[in-house]
Image (cartoon, rainbow, N blue to C red):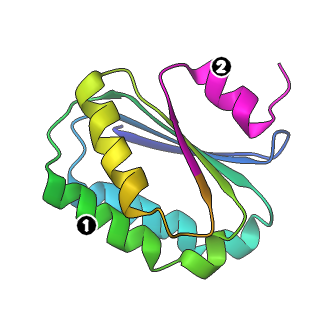
Amino acid sequence: MPIEFVVDRDNSLLVTTYRGVVATEEYVGQVRSVLDRLDEYPGMDFLTDVSDIVHQATGGDIRTISAAIQEYAERIEGRKMAIVVSKTVVYGLMRMLQALMDGLPAHIEIFYEMDEAKRWLGVKS
């Protein structure tokens, strides 16, 4: 399964993991699915793991993903979003996403290490 979603109530996290080839439509669909249900997860932050994704995204794809997230700007206010990557090219694309979402009322950071992302999110080891 290329997309896995887990609600980690112990750490107050919504964890989405993407593996292999994930089409932009699948990515956007997953984002919307989670953000549509945010009322079920008050105050939870986001941990997105794209470290095992097969890179195929373009700048246009990143703009599409950004636009989808921006539709939910009011609902993500004050939440943290950590994105974990493993490849330099994916890091660059996620930095583009971060820049496109610069005006959002959420805090977005990109990490190469899962442990570092979890520390930033306040997860106790």
- Provide residue 8's location: percent of width, then percent of height: 74, 42
Q: Which residue is mark 2?
A: 115
Q: Which mark is residue 64?
A: 1
Classify 10 Å Cα crowding around label 1: few (below 14), some (14-19), many (20 and above): some
Quadrant that contains the N terminus: top left
Asked if the stretch drawn in magenta spans residue 109, the answer is yes
- Please determine whether, in this image, residue 43 is positioned above or below residue 55: below
Please report the bounds of the magenta region as a residue range. 108-125
- Provide residue 16's location: percent of width, then percent of height: 52, 44
Asked if the stretch drawn in magenta spans residue 83, the answer is no
**Residue 39 left/right relative to 125:** left
Of the residues shown, which amino acid type is indicated by label 2? Asp
Classify 10 Å Cα crowding around label 2: few (below 14), some (14-19), many (20 and above): some
Q: Quadrant of residue 91?
A: top left
**Residue 64 left/right relative to 85:** left
Q: Residue at x 20, y 51 (%)?
A: 23
